[in-house]
Every structure is written in structure tokens, then in C-alpha cells.
Image: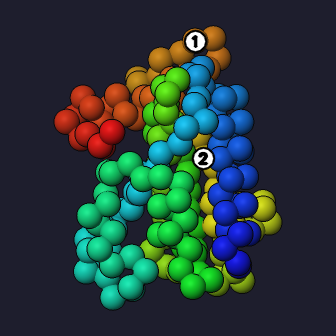
Amino acid sequence: MDKQTFIEHFKLLLTHLKDWTSQNCFNELSDNYAFILDSNEWDIITNAENEHVKGWSELQNKQLSFEQIIDLFYQDGKTPKWVDCNVYYSTPDITVVDLFFSDEFKDESEIYYMERGTGPFKAVVAIPPDHLKVMKGDKFDVNWKKHLDDSKGNHKQN
């Protein structure tokens, strides 16, 4: 995949993510985006032999720009195999998107979600458990995960 196609897929993902999140959540979503890297394998990434992700653990929980994500996720025609994206929180001023990603960088033939036109990205709406749902009509608060993390002292940088 060339870099311009990758950028177009990322932009289309943001459109899908905003649309789908708006269908399920009552919050106002800003078009001013920031991104947080998320992995369940930070220990592996810290010690990675994969040069694409070496040192990324320093970026854990830090807000990154669209351009920074392009620079991190597009490496010599390869991208993460998949990146699941959900709105972590949103205010009228900023929407912070959590990027849960594969540490495997692959060429286009091995990338997930290409048939959606957003590969390697996929829009996901994280649904809160019933005891954490704050509802307005049939829509819930998209900020539930941030509120939960804040209550546990797990703060992602603003």
C-alpha cells in the first residue's frame, strides 16, 4: 500500500468512527482528533526486535497527532496487520481515539479490513457494562472508559 492510500484509509476510518459512535453515544464529538496507542503486549514491544515498534512503549498513554500516527504506522510500505479504533473520550474541543494495534507490520496482501476501504483500521464502539452505563434515551456516554480509568487512577495524558 502506498502512503497516500494509507492516509485516505485512516481519514475514512475517522468518518466511519464518528458516524458509528454518534449512532450509539449522546456525546458531542469534535473533529479535532488526538490518538493514544494501546497494546496488550507493551512488554513485548519494549523488548521488540521489530524495528517498527521498538521504543513505542515510551508513547504509551500519550496523545499523538494524526501525522504522528502516519509516521509510526506507515513504514516502508508496511503497516500494522490491524488497528482497532474506538473513541476513548470526547469533549466539544477534542476527540481522543484509542488505537489498539498489532505489532506485526505486513504488506497490503496481509492487512485486515481492506474490503472495508479502511485497512488496517476498523471502527469499534466500546460498549460499557450495564453497571457503568449512563444513558440519555437509547444512547450511552462515550466517556465511560475514561471515567472508569480515572476512578482507578489510570490516567492517560491529555
Toward the top, the furthest residue is 137
Task: Give the tally of numbered discs.
Answer: 2
Q: CA distance from mark 1 to mark 2?
A: 20 Å
Quarter of the image for the N terminus: give it.
Answer: bottom right
Can residue 130 be seen in the rendering of this structure? no
Q: Position of residue 61 (x, y in %)?
A: 32, 51
Question: Quick one: label 1, few (<14), some, or many (20+) residues within 10 Å?
Answer: few
Quarter of the image for the C terminus: give it.
Answer: top left
Q: Is residue 58 left or right of residue 109?
A: left
Q: Earlier in the sequence, mark 1 or mark 2?
A: 2
Q: Which mark is residue 65?
A: none
Is label 1 in contact with label 2 (beta carbons under 8 Å)? no
Question: Quick one: label 2, few (<14), some, or many (20+) residues within 10 Å?
Answer: some
Seen at 41% across and 57% down, the residue is 37
Can residue 49 be seen in the rendering of this structure? yes
Question: Mark 2 falls on what kind of element?
Answer: loop
Q: Which mark is residue 124?
A: 2
Label 1, on which residue?
136
Q: Nearer the viewer, residue 63 or 137?
A: 63
Q: Position of residue 119 (x, y in %)?
A: 69, 66
Looking at numbered disc 2 in the image, what kind of residue is underneath it? Val
Looking at numbered disc 1 in the image, what kind of residue is underneath it? Lys
Seen at 64% across and 17% down, the residue is 138
**Which picture quadrant has residue 21?**
top right
